[in-house]
Amino acid sequence: MDRPQRYAITLPGPPGRHGPPEVVVVHLTSAYTAAGEPVYADGAAAFRVAIEEEVARPLTALPGPGRHTCLHAVPLP
């Protein structure tokens, strides 16, 4: 099965502020994690994640407060 080339990652809004979530599109890179997982990154390569099924694990710190260790990932065509 072919690996999706890009995903939409949903970042939650600021805690306690009822702000809307932010959606970031990440693309498959040529990099791999130490465990051999492919790395996906946004256009600026500032936000990097490893994705397994529909769960994205951030490899870089997320912008804003809070620390999320798993995020929803949706494959894009």
Image (spheres, rainbow, N blue to C red):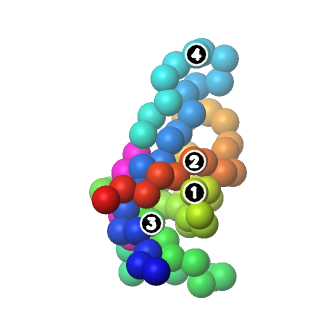
Quarter of the figure with the C terminus: bottom left
Residue ID at (57%, 47%): 72
Disc 3 marks a residue whose amino acid type is Tyr
Determine the image quadrant of residue 35. Answer: bottom right
Instruction: Check disc 1 and report the residue beneath it.
Output: 54
C-alpha separation, residue under disc 2 versus residue under disc 3? 14 Å
Q: Could you tell which of marks 2 and 1 lies nearer the N-terminus? A: 1
| Secondary structure at numbered mark 4 | loop
x, y percentage for residue 76? 36, 56
C-alpha separation, residue under disc 1 versus residue under disc 4? 24 Å
Q: Does residue 24 appear to the left or right of 14 in the view shown?
A: left
Instruction: Check disc 2 and report the residue beneath it.
Output: 72
Determine the image quadrant of residue 7. Answer: bottom left
C-alpha separation, residue under disc 3 versus residue under disc 4? 28 Å
Disc 4 marks a residue whose amino acid type is His
Asked if labels 1 and 2 touch by Cβ distance under 8 angstroms, the answer is: yes
Disc 2 marks a residue whose amino acid type is His
What secondary structure characterizes most of the magenta part? Answer: strand
Instruction: Check disc 3 and report the residue beneath it.
Output: 40
Instruction: Check disc 4 and report the residue beneath it.
Output: 18
Residue stretch in magenta = 24-28
